[in-house]
Amino acid sequence: TLENLKELEFKNQFEIILIDDGSTDQTLEIINNFKLDRLTVLKLQSNCGPSAARNLGLKHARGEYIYFMDADDSIENNTLSLLFNESVSKKFDIIFSDKKRIEKNINQRENNFAFKENKSFNKDQIKNEMLDRLKNPLYLTGLMDLTGRLIKKSIIFDNKIKFREELRYMEDETFMWDLLSHVKNAFYVRNQLYTYNINPNMNTGLSEGLLRGFPLKNFLTIKNQIKISF
């Protein structure tokens, strides 16, 4: 990911905030030796999970937009410039692209896109996307995803939206339910600019979260957030 970020073509000022979530290996040494411009490294003393890590990053973010990216994923060199230019020119609250899903060097989403063409969403259409997700547990692409999108930071901060740190599973989607209830418009770029890399030999955030236990009361937390969002 660090090598990928180093090659970005984006010419505007931007910052990279990397959260070390309580690593016990040589992660920090590797990062410091890489000497990536614009990089800020923040460390949690113990493994607190993705919600705490992202909240810490948000707390220190200074830019006009937020772009969430997982540590083992990558983006195309023109991703930020393309999304930023579209967002600025058309005044969208969220602008997002499609994704590759790479497993064993094969894109499992080759020629597979969330929508047929570039698409804008107004408030009613955003609500319909939320309803589609609510009715269909397999509807995992489109607006409800967290990574791979530019989000106006003001929407997050003005509405005091945070990741729920008691959740290590569905914390990203719960955040998006809250966020989308405040979003007025969005835009989809029909291009696979974000790459989700699957390593079968490593635990995913989902499996790691479930291994730590997921009390039933957490589902009530998620349910209540969905209800509030509508």
Image (cartoon, rainbow, N blue to C red):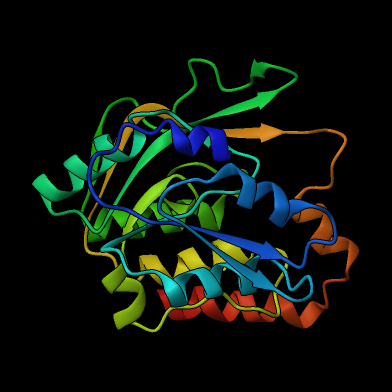
Quadrant for the C terminus in the image: bottom left
Which corner quadrant of the image does residue 34 belong to? top right
Q: Position of residue 186 (x, y in %)?
A: 26, 51
Q: Is residue 74 visible?
A: yes
Q: Is residue 182 visible?
A: no
The residue under the point 31% across, 31% down is: 9
The residue under the point 43% across, 28% down is: 76
Q: Is residue 153 above or below residue 220?
A: above
Left or right of 192 on screen, residue 150: left
Q: Is residue 197 above or below residue 38?
A: above
> Camera-side residue: 120 or 200?
200
Quadrant for the N terminus in the image: top right
> Camera-side residue: 183 or 85?
85
Q: Is residue 152 above or below residue 186?
A: below
Which residue is farthest left?
89
> Camera-side residue: 105 or 179?
105
The residue under the point 79% across, 75% down is: 46
Which corner quadrant of the image does residue 185 belong to? bottom left
Q: Position of residue 94 (x, y in %)?
A: 29, 54
